[in-house]
Amino acid sequence: MKVLVKADNVGKTFIRRSYARRWRDLAAGAWGGSAQEPLWALRGVSFEVAAGEMLGIVGANGAGKSTLLRLLGGVGKPATGSVEIHGRIGALLELGGGFQGDLTGRENAILAAVVAGLLKREAIERLPEIIRFAELEDFIDAPVRTYSTGMTMRLAFAVVVHTDPEVMLVDEFLSVGDLSFQAKCGVRIAELRERGCAIVLVSHSMDQVRELCDRALWLRRGEMVACDSVRSVAAAYEQEMREESLRRTPAAPARTTDAGTELRPRENRFGSLEMEITGVVLHPGPTLTTGGTLGIEIGYHAENPLPAPVFAVSISQPDGTVCLDTNTLSARVAVAQVKGSGAIRLVIDRLDLAAGSYFVDVGVFESSWSHAYDYHWHVYHLTVEGGFAHKGILAPPCRWSLAEATGSPRVKERLAAI
């Protein structure tokens, strides 16, 4: 297929100023002067994205993801190598960042669409659909400075996806709006791909990258670690995170939970302990009937401020088979800066697991998943009762009935009525 995005040996430097403080520099009159040192934000990055393909860019904070996306969007020039883009760009580098606060939503939408390459006539013709998509009918003639962050982001996304982009550059687009709006964004992205749009997505969520992307590019301190299938890159990236968590786990003494289970660092507890899980409570308790509601309350404490930690819960079997894995980042639940003590709760409205013995594993991670602050593995037991009519892990409600062959008209009528 036609290549629409190409990066060849791309590098980017910034200037870091360092002040001389040695006596010989002072004697030479250099005190207070500055020496310019190049800092490599990116180095030797090469990849291609074809029409209809979606590439996910992953890496810890400071890895160079946003810098790379900006270079692809023409914001700045690479110090080495080259960037080639073939086609109209739809860039969501900073949702709503180009809007003028004193202009109305309508005026900003028209202006942004024209900047993106539409004629003013075309922008006005598409405006009603942009407004409907953004769900801003009642606010479109109010100044954008009166909008909430979510409203501004919805309008920005709606404009970009209605300008017929051939290349889309996206920074965490599925954090836009509520869950229903995020689902609508996902559908529109899929439609653009079917039309041949090449998409580059920067994301902190490996679940999001697995779900949406064909390939993934992993950056570490500005350099490429891997660019391959999503499965292979995700596995390697998460393995490094586990190793980093183990490396950071201190040799602390064991601690006993309220249920009497020992938490032993580097055995069933991992993480830097910059933030600690202080307690885990299962509601209504450690025994549950299949199909019942399970609440998981996680208490925590952070001595110092930590920005946007990610809370995660998984339910696994004794042999390590994961039955459920969820976290606040993939669920689009914003967790602000945390300091001091608090609690967070996950409610699973219906847990359709087969009868058996399970563990509830809980953890809290650094915002870009670089390592765990605290992770408790196979500590909290959960027993599920009932569901004996099933084999396997799941025990969803189901029913059997005797019926005629499915080809008969009466059976077709019955099936249509279900």
Image (cartoon, grey):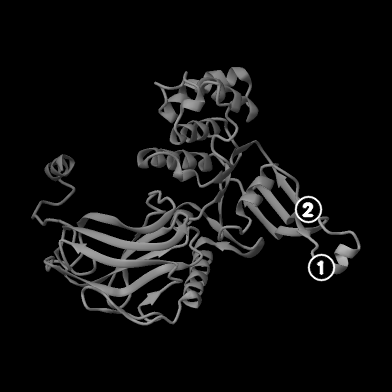
Residue 117 visible (yes or no): no
Q: Residue at x 56, y 44 (%)?
A: 170
Q: Residue at x 40, y 48 (%)?
A: 334
Q: Position of residue 199 (x, y in %)?
A: 57, 46
Q: Is residue 101 above or below residue 166?
A: above
Q: Which mark is residue 22?
A: 1
| Total number of numbered discs in the rendering | 2
Specify whether 218 is left or right of 261: right
Q: Nearer the viewer, residue 268 or 115?
A: 268
Q: Which mark is residue 324?
A: none
Q: Residue at x 45, y 45 (%)?
A: 174
Q: Position of residue 58 (x, y in %)?
A: 55, 58
Dot 2 corresponds to which residue?
79
The local secondary structure at tag 1 comes to loop
Nearer the observer: mark 1 or 2; the answer is: 1
Q: Residue furthest left?
A: 402
Tell me if mark 1 has few (under 14), some (14-19) or many (20+) residues whose alpha carbon lies within 10 angstroms of its own.
few
Q: Position of residue 144 (x, y in %)?
A: 50, 26
Q: Quadrant of residue 260?
A: bottom left
Contact between labelled residues 2 and 1, with CB atoms less than 8 Å apart: no
Amino acid on which the number 2 mark rests in the picture = Ala
Q: Residue at x 35, y 78 (%)?
A: 268
Q: Is residue 220 above or below residue 246?
A: above
**In terms of sequence position, does the residue under pointer 1 or pointer 2 come before the other?**
1
Q: Position of residue 368 (x, y in %)?
A: 50, 59
